Every structure is written in C-alpha cells, then in structure tokens.
Image: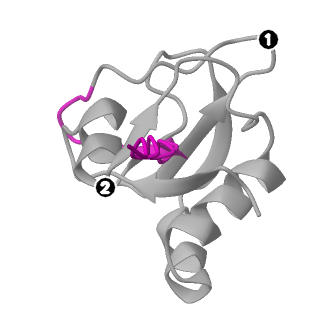
Amino acid sequence: MTNYEWILSEEEQSCTEVCTENEHQCIDGDWGISSVSSFNEALASATSTAEAANICIGGVVPSTYYLSPYIIPSNNWCFYKSPGHQSTCMFGEYARKRLCKCAFIPTPTPTPTPTP
C-alpha cells in the first residue's frame, strides 16, 4: 500500500487546497511524474481508467512549469514534470487542473491513560 494518493484538482485549485480538503497533505518535491507512462498511471489512479483515456487527447508532453503535472481542460493537453525539476503544492492557476500527490497524514498513537 502506498502512503499517498493521486487527486485531480478543480480548475484554479492548488494541490495544498485539494490535499487538505481530503484530509491529506501535499509535499513539494519530485513526485515521480517524469514520463508519459508515469503521468498516465497517476491520472488513471485519480480518475476512472475510462475517463483518463479521454482527458489527454490533445497530447501528453514534458514541462518545466511549476504547476506540473497538470491538465488544460479546454484543449485536453496534459503536462508532466520534466526530469530533474520539482513539483510545488502551493499554487493553482486559471484554466488548469493539477494532478496532486497527496500524502496520508499519520494518525497519532493515543497516549495511554495512566493507571492510579
């Protein structure tokens, strides 16, 4: 089992927002989406496989843009992070849907009640 899940944001929504809404957290860094195949796997995990097949019909290409990985819904182009670049959580942008890597927040172990 992984300690994260992929979630597709709404337009203009940051990964920080979408992860927090789902009781997860987003961590900047290398999210492992640096190829067409890794982008498609993450997208299929965030959506149904059938839906994923229709999202990137414009193409899937590399990008150094800080929002990567993301989708432009108006033209169905998808962008994964070029190798060697980091993904950031904080920002969203008009007409972009972010593909967010949201980490599960560990449940704290309850402190035992002391016995008298």
Q: Is residue 41 above or below residue 93?
A: below
Residue depicted at 55% across the width and 61% down the height:
56
Q: Nearer the viewer, residue 52 or 103?
A: 103
Per the image, label 2 sits on a secondary structure element best described as loop
Residue 59: x %, y % from top left: 61, 53
Residue depicted at 78% across the width and 50% down the height:
38
Quarter of the image for the C terminus: give it: top left
Residue depicted at 79% across the width and 11% down the height:
84
The residue identified by callout 1 is 84
Q: Nearer the viewer, residue 111 or 2?
A: 111
Q: Is 9 displayed left or right of 78 in the figure?
A: left
Per the image, label 1 sits on a secondary structure element best described as loop
Residue 68: x %, y % from top left: 52, 29
Quarter-of-image position of residue 14? top left
Q: Is residue 100 visible?
A: yes
* Amino acid at pointer 2: Asn
Which numbered disc, 2 or 1, marks the residue closer to the eye? 2
- Magenta stretch: give its range: 92-116
Looking at the image, tell me whether mark 2 or mark 1 is earlier in sequence order: 2
Most common secondary structure along the magenta stretch: loop
Q: Does the stretch in magenta take in 27?
A: no
Residue at mark 2 to residue at mark 1: CA–CA distance: 28 Å
Q: Is residue 48 above or below residue 42?
A: below
Residue depicted at 62% across the width and 71% down the height:
44
The numbered disc on residue 22 is 2
* Amino acid at pointer 1: Gly
Q: Does the stretch in magenta take in 105?
A: yes
Q: Is 15 displayed left or right of 57 in the figure?
A: left
Residue 108: x %, y % from top left: 47, 42
Counting other residues with Cα less than 10 Å from the Cα at mark 1, is it few (<14), some (14-19), or many (20 or more)?
few
